[in-house]
Amino acid sequence: MANPAQPPSRPEQTSRPRSVERLITGVPTSDGAGVKLTRVLTQDLQKRLDPFLMLDAFGSDEADDYIRGFPDHPHRGFETITYMLAGRMRHRDSYGNEGLLQNGGVQWMTAGRGVVHSELPEQESGRMEGFQLWLNLPAQDKMVPAWYRDIQSPEIPEVRTGDILIRIIAGASHGVEGAMQRTVTEPLYLDVHFEGPGTFRQSLPADANAFIYVYRGNLQVGEDLVQEQRMAILRNDPGADGVVVHSEGPARMLLIAGQPLREPIAQHGPFVMNTRQELIEAFEDFQAGKFGTNAK
């Protein structure tokens, strides 16, 4: 099955591209039942990169680094977006949803008022690689019903311009809408593959927060070289209308942008609310078994 057929793309217009504010090196850590990963967007960057709360990158050929996966754990108050480059992970949750996340696919989950889920590998060897992004929910939507969607790789729209392939997970690029849209945070989530030398352009709203994560090769943004496994926070330059990225050879990156909520962030582990009292209520509701189909 091919990716969705699209009308002819149109070039992105960028006359005043953003520059790089700073480069970030991720922090090695582990999560779940010992899955090794790199935390690229850490908690101290949440206000700067509002509405995004976290970005984890994981990738290993060693089964011991991922085999125990992420057993049952709760979430409330935000959305999780898991993008699998390679490997197989089974999702199950307290609302009876189940799906297989595999090569090139995305799992988009709105935790909303609360969900308990697991993500467990369905492989005992080979490479497992991908990303998990946390996208905040506005205060008005923190307690919406939980929601889940599996987006298999063929469902993700793609655009080709020269030797550059653009996979549009959310938002729009080159006149083509992505697999997901959100009205308040308006996320843009692109996976951009440079198959050789080339220049990529993407328009961005002036008030959006945006960053790039390079996961293959090296890329040039203005005067700054962004090396593999580095994140570049894009400066909110007054009057800037997008970003221009140049590559001298094969490389891959994520471009992620969204509208800031400018609301208080109260986080403790897997719960992200606006006040301490709401966090206390989240813990109480979880302990009372209210994160599933039997919730009252």
Image (tube, rainbow, N blue to C red):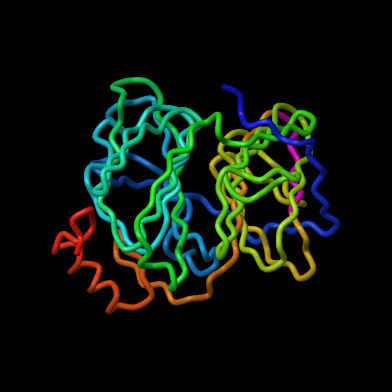
| Quarter in which the N terminus is drawn | top right
Q: Is residue 14 left or right of residue 64?
A: right
Give coordinates of residue 137: x percent, y percent.
Answer: 45, 64
Q: Give the residue drawn at x 59%, y 34%.
A: 216
Q: Residue furthest left?
A: 288
Q: Give the residue drawn at x 30%, y 31%.
A: 121
- Up-down: is 201 above or below 268? above
Q: Is residue 270 left or right of residue 12?
A: left
Give coordinates of residue 270: x percent, y percent.
Answer: 30, 59
Q: Give the residue drawn at x 43%, y 39%.
A: 150
Q: Give the residue drawn at x 53%, y 71%.
A: 261
- Up-down: is 136 above or below 278? above
- Tell how many labels: 0
User: In the picture, residue 62 is in which quadrant?
Assistant: top left
User: In the picture, residue 58 is in which quadrant?
Assistant: top left
Q: Which residues are magenta?
A: 243-249
- Up-down: is 247 above or below 209? above
| Quarter in which the C terminus is drawn | bottom left
Q: Is residue 248 magenta?
A: yes
Q: Nearer the viewer, residue 99 or 120?
A: 99
Main secondary structure found in the magenta portion = strand
Q: Is residue 146 magenta?
A: no
Q: Residue furthest right?
A: 15
Give coordinates of residue 227: x percent, y percent.
Answer: 61, 42
Give coordinates of residue 80: x percent, y percent.
Answer: 41, 51
Q: Is residue 63 left or right of residue 176?
A: left
